[in-house]
Image (tube, helix red, strand yellow):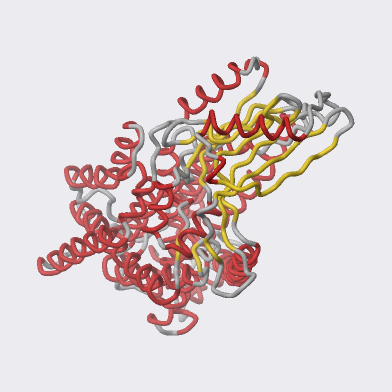
């Protein structure tokens, strides 16, 4: 496909403009991420902390995950705005991002949990879960309170004059009494609204004392008022409703795709791409399993010690693999039916399906150009998204959680998961919402434009469960990107949109390693996976194979070739049986007699 020079200049200009827009409106998000303390360092700090307390850490299994204070991030963005949130974090030495480390034993309640700042490496929270029957000397409330104050002063520079006692409770057990104290910082109160008695956010520090032991402490607790939690719950219900609507739509299109696969199982286009689609499906299945193994720490962290670890892992693996398998089969239905539908719905736009490249080649300079176009499309997508977010901020009080900036840091190899997410989402979603949904939408509505809007809206609904408030805005944002990608798809084919989608997802899962503070290995591995499509394009450029289109024909097995010779002999030597009959009549007659469709198609065409 030849792209005009003027078109390249337009795309380049839009890409540069979009990069500028993203830098101006969105780049600031990444200034909050500080991953100076990596997984290994955090785990080492946690072990040393326990060893100083006399704990034999070799007796415990460990699990470590990376996360953030979502509650504080939501509230501060909502009521202070992003810039003021950053000032708040800096002024009060508040940690938005941290490592959670768990030390546990199988079938034993006692365990230790620690929170280590990813910025400073300080242990900012600690808890020691004891058996209810554990005995501790009761030295009274006054002693426990004084012990708590002294500990906070020594550990966090606590100044009692800056705080007021917020909570003072005790919990009695058979052989001990635990005392809980929390203090509220006097100069922090962020009201929920201007109305009276609606509450406000507070910043607390807390300690639990058991006997002479500091059994638990937290450097900073951001306490949001109940009204905010109810508001947040209502927002999430909107997301749940939209997700339910999507599941209904998705079930409908999945059933329709399955119907087309069954009804068109003898379709020549489907036959040609079948082996390719099955191969890609198997690769997606294996990559998904690999990704699950890469995030095994999450599974360990959630292990309930009331059951055996092996039983817990076995149950988890079985249920997870079943869901993965079902989702993978769904992709196979969309890919097979999408290829055959696209072949009929857009006969002049062959580049919109893999069938075109299976009949020509994936390794040509034309493919290299499409890869380059994908990179430009990716930058334009960033610009469109930034504009959409800005519109949301100005008109709908939009705010965005930062959990997407940290979710892969828990994994053993974040760049591997980023690659898998990008590869899976780009292939699966572009095949589902571009190749299949647009073709089916055109067939259903008899209009390409309506097909584009239908597919884009469906794609937006598919992302409505992501935490962005108000949650309906996510549908608008993704649908806008979907319309843009649909235009690129119909004009330039499947490769640019897959490349752009891959880069978009990889970027948003690794940008904290590019623009935040992190270990060099994360920085360089991110560059590598972002360069993978370009490396493929370079291979295609230098291979530069011919793009002459091979004829669309059945690929017959040895058994089918043997039957083909028999049927050809029969047709040649019994012409009287088929005189004055159309080719289609002969075809249907032979199929009704039990002949293989592929053999019949080949014989009728040849004879």
Give x and y (percent) for residue 414. 43, 38
Give x and y (percent) for residue 202. 57, 54
Q: Nearer the viewer, residue 217 or 471?
A: 217
Q: Residue at 40% of width from left, 43% of height from top?
A: 419
Give x and y (percent) for residue 517. 34, 39
Q: Nearer the viewer, residue 166 or 291?
A: 166
Q: Quadrant of the N terminus?
A: bottom left
Q: Please state if 136 lies on the left or on the right of 92 as rendered.
A: right
Q: Please state if 7 lies on the left or on the right of 281 as rendered.
A: left
Residue 365 visible in rendering: yes
Residue 571 visible in rendering: no
Q: Nearer the viewer, residue 473 or 349?
A: 473
Give x and y (percent) for residue 281. 50, 49
Q: Residue at 79% of width from left, 27% of height from top?
A: 139
Q: Residue 433, relative to residue 210: is it above or below?
A: below
Residue projecting furthest to the front: 161
Q: Nearer the viewer, residue 542 or 132?
A: 132
Q: Quadrant of the C terminus?
A: bottom left
Q: Please state if 360 lies on the left or on the right of 453 as rendered.
A: left
Residue projecting furthest to the bottom: 446
């Amino acid at each position: 496909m030849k792209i005009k020079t003027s078109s390249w200049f337009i795309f380049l200009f839009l890409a540069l403009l979009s990069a500028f827009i993203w830098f101006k409106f969105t780049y600031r998000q990444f200034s909050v991420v500080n991953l100076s303390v990596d997984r290994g360092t955090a785990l080492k700090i946690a072990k040393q902390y326990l060893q100083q307390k006399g704990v034999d850490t070799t007796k415990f299994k460990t699990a470590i995950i990376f996360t953030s204070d979502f509650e504080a991030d939501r509230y501060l963005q909502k009521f202070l705005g992003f810039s003021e949130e950053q000032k708040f974090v800096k002024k009060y030495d508040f940690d938005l991002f941290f490592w959670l480390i768990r030390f546990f034993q199988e079938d034993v309640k006692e365990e230790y949990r620690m929170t280590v700042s990813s910025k400073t490496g300080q242990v900012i929270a600690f808890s020691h879960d004891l058996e209810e029957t554990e005995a501790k000397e009761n030295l009274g409330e006054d002693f426990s309170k004084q012990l708590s104050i002294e500990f906070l002063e020594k550990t966090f520079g606590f100044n009692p004059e800056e705080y007021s006692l917020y909570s003072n409770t005790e919990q009695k057990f058979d052989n001990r009494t635990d005392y809980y104290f929390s203090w509220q910082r006097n100069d922090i109160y962020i009201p929920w609204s201007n109305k009276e008695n609606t509450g406000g956010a507070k910043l607390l520090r807390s300690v639990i004392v058991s006997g002479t032991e500091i059994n638990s402490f937290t450097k900073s607790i951001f306490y949001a008022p109940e009204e905010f939690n109810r508001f947040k719950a209502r927002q999430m219900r909107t997301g749940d409703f939209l997700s339910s609507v999507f599941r209904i739509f998705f079930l409908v299109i999945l059933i329709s795709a399955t119907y087309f696969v069954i009804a068109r199982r003898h379709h020549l286009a489907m036959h040609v791409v079948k082996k390719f689609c099955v191969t890609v499906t198997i690769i997606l299945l294996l990559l998904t399993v690999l990704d699950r193994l890469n995030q095994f720490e999450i599974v360990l962290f959630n292990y309930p010690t009331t059951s055996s670890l092996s039983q817990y892992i076995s149950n988890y693996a079985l249920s997870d693999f079943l869901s993965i398998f079902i989702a993978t089969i769904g992709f196979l239905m969309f890919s097979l039916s999408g290829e055959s539908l696209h072949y009929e719905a857009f006969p002049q736009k062959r580049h919109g399906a893999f069938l075109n490249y299976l009949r020509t080649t994936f390794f040509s300079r034309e493919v290299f150009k499409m890869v380059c176009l994908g990179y430009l499309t990716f930058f334009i997508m960033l610009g469109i998204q930034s504009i959409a977010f800005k519109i949301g901020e100005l008109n709908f009080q939009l705010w965005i959680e930062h959990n997407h900036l940290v979710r892969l840091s828990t994994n053993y190899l974040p760049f591997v998961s980023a690659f898998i997410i990008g590869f899976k989402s780009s292939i699966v979603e572009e095949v589902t919402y571009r190749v299949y949904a647009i073709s089916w939408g055109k067939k259903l509505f008899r209009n390409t434009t309506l097909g584009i809007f239908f597919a884009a809206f469906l794609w937006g609904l598919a992302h409505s469960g992501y935490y962005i408030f108000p949650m309906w805005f996510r549908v608008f944002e993704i649908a806008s990107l979907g319309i843009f990608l649909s235009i690129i798809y119909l004009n330039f084919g499947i490769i640019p949109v897959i490349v752009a989608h891959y880069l978009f997802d990889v970027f948003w899962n690794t940008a904290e390693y590019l623009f935040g503070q992190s270990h060099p290995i994360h920085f360089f591995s991110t560059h590598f996976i972002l360069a993978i499509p370009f490396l493929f394009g370079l291979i295609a450029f230098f291979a530069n194979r011919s793009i002459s289109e091979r004829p669309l024909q059945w690929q017959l097995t040895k058994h089918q070739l043997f039957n083909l010779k028999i049927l050809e002999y029969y047709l040649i030597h019994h012409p009287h049986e088929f005189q004055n009959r159309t080719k289609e009549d002969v075809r249907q007659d032979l199929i009704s007699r039990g002949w293989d469709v592929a053999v019949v198609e080949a014989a009728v065409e040849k004879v």
